[in-house]
Structures are given as C-alpha cells and as structure tokens.
Image (cartoon, rainbow, N blue to C red):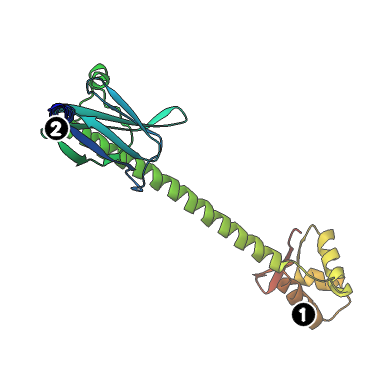
Amino acid sequence: MVKILKFIFLLYAVGSVSGAVIHGTVYEWHTLEPLQNVILDINSTPPQRFVAKEGAYEFELEKGQYCIKTRYYENNELLYYSEENVSIETDGDFILDIIMFPNIDLNEKFFEDFDINLSIDEGLLEGIEEGREEELSTRGIIAIIIISLILLYLLKFRRRSKEEGKKPTEVLPDDLKEVENILRRYDGRMTQLELRKELNYSEAKVSLMLADLENRGLIEKFKRGRGNIIILKKT
C-alpha cells in the first residue's frame, strides 16, 4: 500500500513540474553561421538568462506569453539585437532558431525631437532636380575649361615644334654667315641688289644663298617692284 502511494505521489510530482522546453540556435543574418557568446533573456517567472557560447540555447517554460531578447556584443558595442515573441499553449519540445540582424535604433522620440517628415512632396523633388541641373552645369563648365586648356597646350606645343624645326640644326657655312653678318650691319633689312653689291659673288650665287637661308628660316624675302627685300629674322 505504501509503495502504491509513493508511485502515485511520484506521478503527481512529475506532472506538476511538466512544461515546455524551447531551444534552438542563434545565427548571424549575413553568413547564417551560429553566433557565439550571445546573451538571451526571457521574461519568465523568475526571469531567465542564457549565454549561448556556441550559439545554442534552451529555456524551460510554463504556459504563457513570453518575449526573448537576444543581444550580441563586439568590443563592448551592441552589434546585433532581436526580440522574439513566444506563446506557449501546450507542453512539449519546441525549436525556435533566431536570426540576428544589425542593431538599428529607431527611437520614436528621436524623430519627434527633429520633426522629420518622411513624405516626399513636389517641392523637394524640384529642389533635387535643380540641384542636379546646377551640378551638371558646373561639370559642363569645368569640362569646357579643361578641353580649352588642352587645345591651347597642343597649339602652343605644335607652334613651338614648328619653330624649332625651322631653327638651324647645323653650323652655317662661311658664305651664309657672311650674308647674315651683312644683314645685321644694315639692321636686318636691305634689298637684294644692295646685298649683292656687298658680296663678291654672282647674281645666281647670291640667289641660291638667299634661298638656302630662307629654307633655314633665317630670312624672309618679299617681292618689291623688280627686286626683292631681304629681312633677317630675329634669332
């Protein structure tokens, strides 16, 4: 009789402590890998706290409504946070995996203090379009300036290369030096007839020397009446 009573008491004790077990794994949202050292709190009576060192957790609960708050810290900074509402209506074993998302603090008071209006009106859109037009206009002006500078540089470089190409690259022969020196004595300007009188060369020889100097870019020859005017370029 005593044994029967003990067995009945044991069955009653087991039935009185029966309840639900809820367990699962906490995962990181991006990699879906288990998060280690996650802190879980549940508002049971008494409140329970579980540190999921390997990402797995477990709570024993009675029937009722609960909220599981999950936090994950890195360097003392709350990196992930979640809240899961749980309703226990029957006894049993339940699995609830939790996915942790980045902590985003959306405090309503913050928005009330700054009176932020999330609606987009036409005035805002017009302001955006005007800002874009001003930005495009500024970029266009900058592009024109850059292109102009490049063109100026190319023109200057081409002109300088052309001028350098006309400069003599070798020592002048003595007869051409003589012509150059005579032109310098006459301030760089004289007629071909006057020049031939200063030289002891034939008219054909003088014409050839002048053509040579002109090709070298040292003189300019202009037609005037029946003769030519010879001008020495400044070098």
Rendering coords of residue 6 (x, y %) = 17, 27
In which quadrant of the rendered image does the N terminus lie?
Answer: top left
Residue 87 picture quarter:
top left
Q: Nearer the viewer, residue 122 or 76?
A: 76
Rendering coords of residue 96 (x, y %) = 23, 40
Report helix, strand or loop for mark 1.
helix
Q: Nearer the viewer, residue 188 or 56?
A: 56
Rendering coords of residue 199 (x, y %) = 87, 73
Of the residues shown, which amino acid type is indicated by label 1? Answer: Leu
Separation of marks 2 and 1 at Cα, in angstroms: 116 Å
Of the residues shown, which amino acid type is indicated by label 2? Answer: Ile
Residue 33 in the image: above or below residue 204: above
- The mark closer to the camera, 2 or 1, is 2
Label 2–label 1 contact, CB within 8 A: no
Residue 129 in the image: above or below residue 164: above
Residue 171 picture quarter:
bottom right
Horizontal side of residue 81 vs 149, given as left or right: left
Horizontal side of residue 189 vs 149, given as left or right: right
Residue at (76% x, 64% y) in the render: 190
Rendering coords of residue 206 (x, y %) = 80, 77
Circle 1 sits on which residue?
208
Residue 89 picture quarter:
top left
Q: Nearer the viewer, residue 212 or 96?
A: 96
